[in-house]
Amino acid sequence: MKKLFIIFFISIVCWGIIGSSAVFACENGYPHVAKKNGTYDARQNDLWELAQDYVFYRNEILVHHRKGDQKGAAKARSAFQKTNNWLSQYPEEHVNKALELAEECRK
């Protein structure tokens, strides 16, 4: 019984730590990283905002397309393509991690 209680207690603590770290990451975004050319953007949260925009506009394209709103889909697609171009300035490894985090935080 004592062993079961200890396992339960440890699992609750771990769950709390994992949950709070996810909240921390969503609130604070992705770290300030160098672009492929070695420079840093003036805005420390540039990559994080771009990742969030990518997820947002990708979803907007789908929403407008499902509604049959071609004009809205075209506008969202244009913003998505601009965002994608800006993201291409960062190393793929960081872009992929930032996008994963943005997806997770959107839920």
Image: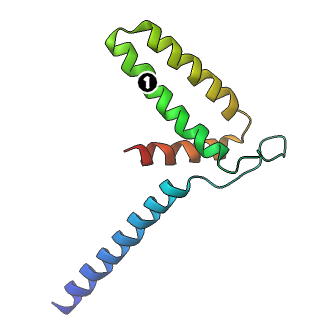
Colour setup of the view: rainbow
What residue is shown at x 37% (from left), y 73% (from top)?
Answer: 14
In the image, taking residue 26 as reference, residue 49 lies left or right, namely: right
Residue 6 falls in image quadrant:
bottom left
Tell which of 42 and 8 is nearer to you: 42
> Which residue is farthest right?
38
Where is residue 43 drawn, in percent x and y? 71, 47
Disc 1 target residue: 60
Report crowding for label 1: few under 14, some 14 to 19, many 20 or more residues within 10 A (C-alpha).
some
In the image, taking residue 33 as reference, residue 14 lies left or right, namely: left
Secondary structure, mark 1, is: helix
What residue is shown at x 57% (from left), y 46% (from top)?
Answer: 98
Give the quarter of the figure containing the C terminus: top left
Tell which of 98 and 93 is nearer to you: 98
Is residue 93 positioned above or below 18 on the image?
above
Where is residue 58 drawn, in percent x and y? 48, 26
- Type of the residue with mark 1: Glu
Where is residue 19 drawn, in percent x and y? 38, 64
